[in-house]
Amino acid sequence: MKLQRKNGLRATALGALAISGALVLTACGSDDNAGGTGGTGEKTNAASNIKCDDAKGKLLASGSSAQKNAMDLWVKNYMAACTGVEVNYKSSSSGEGIVAFNQGTVGFAGSDSALKPDEVAESKKVCKGGQGINLPMVGGPIAIGYNLPGVDNLNLDASTIAKIFNGKIKKWNDPAIAGLNKGVKLPDTAIQAFHRSEDSGTTQNLGKYLGATAKADWPYEAEKKWPAPGGQAASGSSGVAAQVKQAEGSIGYFELSYATSQSIPTVKISTGAAAPVEASSENASKAIAAAKIKGTGKDLALGLDYTTKADGAYPIVLVTYEVVCDTGNKAETLGTVKSFLTYTASEEGQKVLSGAGYAPIPAEINAKVRETVAGLK
């Protein structure tokens, strides 16, 4: 295998490295949960199908806050199975995760959007003899959460969402909103729209949806940086959700689990289907199931259809990628990267997502992810 040479840094130095604000989860299992070693030398957990294989030491990763709640579950389960191994995922943003990956400070990065050509080119400096590739791992709906006491059911379409977030619609009883919510008493309350303050793949995916379905009202390129004037900024999906939770008249966007965990009502999207579509794991799965692989070689970046009008298909979806080197991974973390990502892409790993507000990646795509992970060098 081609492994990146250590540049004078010993693997033990990683054990002393601390990242401010990083999420560090300790194994919650006792020694009774520890995996044994079979006749083949392969370590497995007696209570699960997690294969620890050559995993060892500490694995640092960072990026997407949209996948944080999924990572919490995965890390907890994995570390309970693979005692003595620590996976440390810092929830920041997709942009920060890619920067950290291309600086060589993390074993993998989480990103809500696939690597751009310039980011792939930059990755070749770290992935000696290879490059960064995208492995789809987490799917889910981007919920539009709101805080409007007395309004428990709210329908919006792409045009009204675009006009709200670029400041064209300023009051909740605006005729455009009222027209989509017949019989609902909407207050004469000012709208407070919150967006992400840092580069965010969630922002970019929302922009892709609005650009595809409401171009006349959203004339911006789909970038990670928030493009529209006005509004208020907050850090991370958790920050946006916290602001919406506390500010009456507010609206924001974040991964669904942030809404469900804080009991924030979410918008139903009028897509042209028979009925407005609710943000749910099941409805997001219907949209993600139509995704096609658009990456080449070992890259598994997906193409999503944001314009779907299929009944029950929620259109504002994201797929979070784990970004790794196809060749040139660090020797001291390669075994853990392969073991951990094999678990997250497994049927068992994907099954835990639905209960947390995520949508599992389609099985046939997951099979290709596992095959690619097995071949990492």
Image (cartoon, helix red, strand yellow):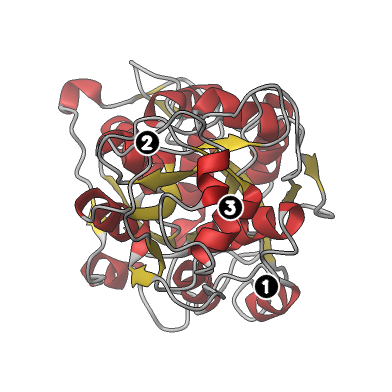
Residue 217 appears anywhere in the view: yes
Residue type (three-letter) at the residue carrying disc 2 = Lys
Residue at disc 1, secondary structure: loop
Q: On the rendered image, what quadrant is the N terminus found in?
A: bottom right
Upstream in the sequence, badge 3 or badge 2?
Answer: 3
Q: Of residues 168 and 228, which is closer to you in this image?
A: 168
What amino acid type is highlighted by mark number 3? Thr
Of the two numbered discs 3 and 1 in the rendering, the one whose residue sits closer to the viewer = 3
The residue at 75%/55% (across/down) is: 212
Q: Is residue 331 above or below residue 359?
A: below
Q: Which residue is mark 2?
A: 185
For image coordinates 70% across by 68% down, the residue present is: 131
Amino acid, disc 1: Tyr
Rendered location of residue 51, percent (x, y): 46, 30
* Residue 1 seen anywhere in this rendered image of the structure: no
- Which residue carries the number 3 mark? 160
Q: Residues within 10 Å of mark 1 (few under 14, many from 20)?
A: some
128 up-or-down from 291: above or below: below
- Give the image quarter of residue 312: top right
User: How far, Cα to Cα, is label 1 from label 2?
Assistant: 32 Å
Task: Work out whether mark 1 precedes mark 2 in sequence or the reverse, and give the earlier one.
Answer: 2
Q: Position of residue 338 (x, y in %)?
A: 54, 45
Q: Circle 1 sits on which residue?
A: 220
How far apart in space, not on screen, are marks 3 and 2 (Cα)?
17 Å
